[in-house]
Image (cartoon, coloured by chain):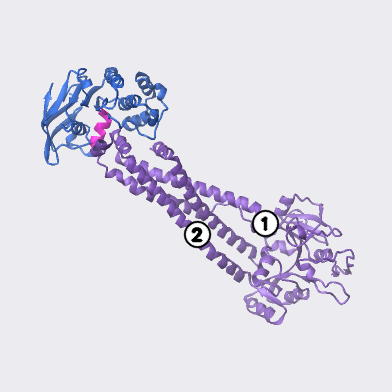
Chain colours: A purple, B blue
Amino acid sequence: MFGLALAYLRDRSLTTALNILLLGLSVAMLVLLVQFSSQLTSRLDRDAEGVDLVVGAKGSPLQLILSSIFHIDQPTGNIPLDSLNMLRRDPAVKKAIPLALGDNFDGFRIVGTDASYAGFYGGEIAQGKMFEKPMDAVMGSGVAKITGAQLGQQFIGSHGLETEDEAGQGHDHAPFETVGILAPTGTVVDRLILTSVESVWDVHGIEHDHEGHDHESHDDHDGHDHDHAADDRTLSSRGGLEPELTAILVSYRNAAGAIRIPAMINRQTEMQAAAPAVETARLLGLFGAGIEGARIFAWILAATGGLAIFIALLNMARTREGDLALLRVMGASKIQVFGTILLEGLITAAAGAVLGIVAAHTALFVAGRSFQTLSELGLSAAQFLPAELGIIAAVLLIGGIAALIPAARIFRINLASTLARTS
Amino acid sequence: MLLEIENLHYSTNEKPLLSDFRLSLEEGHHHLLVGPSGSGKTTLINLICGLLSPEKGSISIAGHDIATLSESGRDKIRRENIGIVFQTLRLVSALDLTANLLLAQRLSRGKIDAPLIGSLLERLGIAHRAKAQPHQMSHGEAQRAAIARALVTQPQLLIADEPTSALDEANAKQVTDLLLECAADYGVTLLIATHDDRLTPIFSNRIALSEHMPKEA
């Protein structure tokens, strides 16, 4: 009877195709919403794991979190280098990791930090070694894969944090050298280039005390207007730029830190302290309302698809009463004819579900390649979620329910009178 | 006895249509069921096929009294013993000719006999239309296809309700000849209900229904 159900669907192919398309659209929308909210939540959770507090320049706390943890926004400004020592001296602080941002290579952010930053995300060296001296760089796995970087290769960073044409001024005087490549971690580190904070200062011609000797300022550094944090540094007493940081990632040694440190930073310094958990929840809350609205719309679309199947099958059952009666005369039982019509609804729904899932994953794949922000969020098209099985089941249920009433007509057909009318 | 009807009573709208009706059909003895419209030909066919239940009496097909059986029991007897050809309702509209015959075999016998399908299509002269959809066939081809659909399950009794009424002279003769030839070839007994006078001279056994009283001719 499966073949017969397929034949009936083929027989009214345009209606069938439109019904499949309608259901496919709703499934695609639902899968995209589920994938986006799930992958975004897990990615944000994973990237923020272990970071209790981010200290940075005053401004939007959400912007500070986005720029310092997820690396998808501009930094809020710079903070004094002394603040790192202040935090490291605090007994409630277990770890304080400096960040100095400002440049990119081929769209991938160059992050000045210390060697413990990669370990924070479980990053291990897959090739080469961790950076030790200025201008050593360690590539995240994703960066190495996409750029094809090899150990020993040199590259030049560009001003700014994105690959916009107008921001593409290179630091030709200070090339980086790839000394290590990290193993994949599934976190933001995969898409970063790690180097020492001193490297970032050197690139921007900032004097600093480096391993016991002073670096000279790079006289050939072009002084044009930069749109990134490293260029907002204050002038030193000698007229050069003061070494500063963009942000500090903090993890507490004990719960007392969570009470005292944010309050102390926000009230007693020119800096701000933002808690990733709070800002992530706020971000998801902002997304959540939109996602919920879209989800309701998608389910309405799915219900409309079910209604379209219902109308198509009801019409079919009416106009093909003779066919159904002939099937009974040919030896089909009522249950077999009922099952055939039910199968038509289920096959339509299943085809819609498959179309929707394929379309959604294709859209994720294309979007990941086309939009840098989505790419930076690490959206994966190959990941299937249990919720997608739930969507398939719900759509099959809609198809089954839509077919139930038309199929049930077979139990009310009077064969003799139907044949008298149609034969 | 292939078909034996005893003391059959059936009314429509509280008006008796068949009263104390009797009929015996031996294997290989083809019969024509004749009578004007409203005389009860189609009702009698529906009763024999188990599509209607009699008020009284017995209808025995190949030794099984279908009047006493449940609907599914009647379905089974029909499936195993009877092939039916209608005037216009010939094939399942969504399937091509071969798929119709395969479905008929599967529903009736639970298995496929492809050589029989091939030989029937050849015998009925529609082998070249094996993959044609019902709406692509002419009236004559479609009626021959309906005969193939009824015979492909190898029934003992083939009932045809007005098989030639919608056909022109040439097609009517061709279909009648094919019915008789196939009945002989495949060992099937024919019961043909018609008011088509063109068939009367061909069949020697006639059951005439008029004023609710059957007459053996």
Q: Secondary structure at mark 2?
A: helix
User: Is residue B51 left or right of A251 when viewed as pictured?
Assistant: left
On-image quarter of the N terminus of chain B: top left
Q: Amino acid at mark 1?
A: Gln
Residue A373 appears in the rendering: yes
Report the predominant secondary structure element of the magenta stretch: helix
In-front residue for pair B141/A121: B141
The image shows residue B189, relative to residue B78, as above or below, that is: above
The residue pinned by badge 1 equals A372
Q: Amino acid at mark 2?
A: Arg
Residue with the most extreme front position: B168
Q: Which residues are magenta?
A: B73-84
The image shows residue A250, relative to residue B16, as above or below, that is: below
Please identify the quarter of the rendering in which residue B91 is found: top left
* Marked residue chain, label 2: A
User: Is residue B40 left or right of A36 when viewed as pictured?
Assistant: left
Residue A295 is tagged as 2
